[in-house]
Image: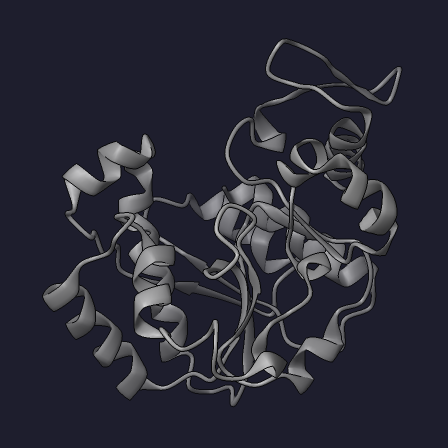
Amino acid sequence: YCQGALVLGKSLRNHKTSRQLVVMITSQVTSRMRDVLSNIFDEVVEVDILDSADSVHLSLMKRPELGITFTKFQCWTLTQYTKCVYMDADTIVLCNIDELFDRDEFSAAPDSGWPDCFNSGVFVFRPSVETFHKLLHFAEVHGSFDGGDQGLLNSFFSNWATADISKHLPFIYNLSISSVYTYKPAFLQFGSEAKVVHFLGTPKPWNCKYNPQTRWIVEDESLSGQEHLSYLVLWWEIY
């Protein structure tokens, strides 16, 4: 995911963000990669790994690595900032998105699989140690319905679906790559307006093969759709 964070940071720089860029890493990240990240990000912050320990729920999701995504809750401890936009490392921006700072906590885009839930890959929040500890306590008491951070955050911010429409980010701020081919008519109509692409699921861009001579992805059975491939190519061109 370090490669993903690197490309995300470069895409934000390429589109002239005026905001400070912070990347959160774990202790396993090598000193060489830290140096590379520090060339892109204003701050490289090491955080502790938290594990939800919901092995049953995680196995249902077929994504056991989601357990450590509770580490993402550490972003609420970045209290040197008054407001932040969190972005997963498997996202890239297609244009400047600084306008997201006009939104308030907790603003997020709907999840394509269950739109009454938000997708936790992109969200606006206000750092607060109090909120951080409330999240940890909530996790201990209630767990997460999907074993990962998205389930817990949706339960914690449970009124997102009904309370304030201004906190519903348009889907173009978190366009999941799966939506490109599961709802192609909508993509053909609105896809050109996309601002953030989210490489949900597999394969991740850094696991794909890129041919620099043809400037195209080496296709296999796991890849389909010209639009999907064009976003993967864009990722590699930034990388």
The one of 35 and 161 positioned closer to us in this rendering: 161
State the image quarter where residue 59 is shown. Answer: top left
Q: Could you tell me which residue is drawn at 38 percent across and 57 percent down? A: 150
Residue 189 in the image: above or below residue 170: above
State the image quarter where residue 170 is shown. Answer: bottom right
Q: Left or right: where does residue 120 sit relative to residue 6?
A: left
The residue most toward the top is 221
Q: Left or right: where does residue 226 sit relative to residue 6?
A: right
The one of 78 and 145 positioned closer to us in this rendering: 145
Residue 156 screen position, x and y as percent: 31, 72
Residue 119 screen position, x and y as percent: 50, 57
Q: Could you tell me which residue is drawn at 32 percent across and 38 percent down? A: 65
Q: Could you tell me which residue is drawn at 63 percent across and 31 percent down? A: 205
Residue 75 in the image: above or below residue 236: below
Residue 232 screen position, x and y as percent: 72, 32
Quadrant of the image for the C terminus?
top right
The residue most toward the left is 141
